[in-house]
Image (cartoon, grey):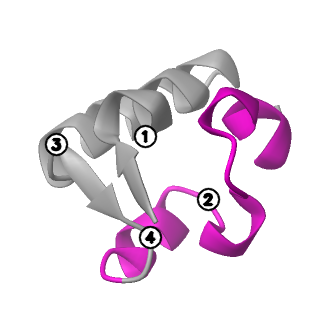
Amino acid sequence: MQLDKQQIIDALKNRGDHDQAQQAQDDLPDQVDTDQHSDLLARFGVDPGDLGGAAGGLGDKIGL
């Protein structure tokens, strides 16, 4: 599944992880492939298996 990097950054900011959000801004490509970039997502506490298909629910899916 492809996600926009900004969705992940926004979710991290919403949960108060501003340092991780900045790191994600620096490290993630503009379009994040959840399979290809699963190691980066795990580093930011984002489980690709929990992302589901609804990008709008991203915050709920990662415990926000």
Pointer 3: what residue? Answer: 30
Q: Which mark is residue 42?
A: none
Viewer-nearest of discs 4 and 2: 4
Q: Does the magenta stretch include residue 48?
A: yes
Q: Residue 34 carries which label?
A: 4
Q: Distance between the residues labelled 2 and 1?
A: 9 Å
Pointer 2: what residue? Answer: 45
Q: Are the residues at dot 3 and dot 2 in contact (C-beta closer than 8 Å)? A: no
Amino acid type, callout 2: Gly
Q: Are the residues at dot 2 and dot 1 in contact (C-beta closer than 8 Å)? A: yes
Counting residues from the N terminus, which is met first, the one under dot 4 or under dot 1? 1
Counting residues from the N terminus, which is met first, the one under dot 2 or under dot 1? 1
Amino acid type, callout 1: Gln
Amino acid type, callout 4: Thr
Counting residues from the N terminus, which is met first, the one under dot 1 or under dot 3? 1
Counting residues from the N terminus, which is met first, the one under dot 3 or under dot 2? 3
Amino acid type, callout 3: Asp
Q: Are the residues at dot 1 and dot 3 in contact (C-beta closer than 8 Å)? A: no
Q: Does the magenta stretch include residue 41?
A: yes
Viewer-nearest of discs 3 and 2: 3
Magenta stretch: give its range: 36-63
Look at the numbered disc 3 and give the secondary structure of its residue: loop
> Within 10 Å of the Cα at label 2, are there few (<14), some (14-19), or many (20+) other Cα atoms?
some
Is residue 45 visible in the rendered structure shown here? yes
Q: Distance between the residues labelled 3 and 2?
A: 18 Å
Q: Where is residue 58 in the image (x, y as percent from the top left)?
A: 68, 38
> Within 10 Å of the Cα at label 4, are there few (<14), some (14-19), or many (20+) other Cα atoms?
some
